[in-house]
């Protein structure tokens, strides 16, 4: 298990399509142990929304994509 992330969310993230920006964000955050609460605050959404992005259940609003690209670039 990765610190701060349940095995369930880690597995769902691995199984989700990496074509989705939320899934890619999840992979980086899981790898670098960035807390979901930090991501939620950054994008002004709930932690549940972030978990849904990470697992590919939903995608971020188009208005967040540019900010998310910058956030990902800064994490990588």
Image: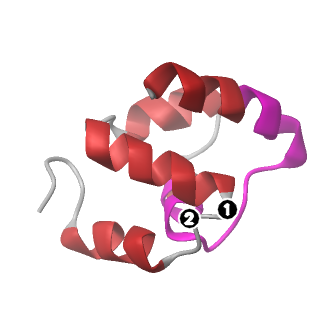
- To which residue does mark 2 refer? 52
The structure's colour scheme is secondary structure
Q: Residue at horizontal 20%, vertical 71%?
A: 7
Residue 12 at least partly seen: yes
Residue 30 sits above or below residue 37 on the image: below
**Front-most of residues 35 and 68:** 68
**x then y, percent, for residue 19:** 67, 64
- The secondary element bearing badge 1 is classed as loop
**x then y, percent, for residue 5:** 24, 56
Q: Nearer the viewer, mark 2 or mark 1?
A: 1
Asked if disc 2 and disc 1 are in contact, CB closer than 8 Å, the reply is: no
Task: Indicate the quadrant containing the N terminus: top left, top right, bottom left or bottom right.
Answer: bottom left
Residue segment shown in magenta: 50-67
Q: Residue at horizontal 30%, vertical 66%?
A: 10
Residue 1 magenta-drawn? Answer: no
Residue 76 sits above or below residue 55 on the image: above
- The secondary element bearing badge 2 is classed as helix
Q: Is residue 61 left or right of residue 41?
A: right
* Residue furthest top as drawn: 74
**x then y, percent, for residue 42:** 57, 25
Q: Residue at horizontal 79%, vertical 37%?
A: 64
Image quadrant where residue 75 sits: top left
* Sooner in the amino-acid sequence: mark 2 or mark 1: 1
Q: Residue at horizontal 41%, vertical 36%?
A: 37
Task: Judge the density around disc 2: few (<14), some (14-19), many (≥20) Cα neighbours within 10 Å.
Answer: many
**x then y, percent, for residue 74:** 52, 19
Tag count? 2
- To which residue does mark 1 refer? 20
Mark 2–mark 1 Cα distance, whole angstroms, equals 11 Å
Q: Main secondary structure of the magenta part?
A: helix
Task: Judge the density around disc 1: few (<14), some (14-19), many (≥20) Cα neighbours within 10 Å.
Answer: some
């Amino acid at each position: 298990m990765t610190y701060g992330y349940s095995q369930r969310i880690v597995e769902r993230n691995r199984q989700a399509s990496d074509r989705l920006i939320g899934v890619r964000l999840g992979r980086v955050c899981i790898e670098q142990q960035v807390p979901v609460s930090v991501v939620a605050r950054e994008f002004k959404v709930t932690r549940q929304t972030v978990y849904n992005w990470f697992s590919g259940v939903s995608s971020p609003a188009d208005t967040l994509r540019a900010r998310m690209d910058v956030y990902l670039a800064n994490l990588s």
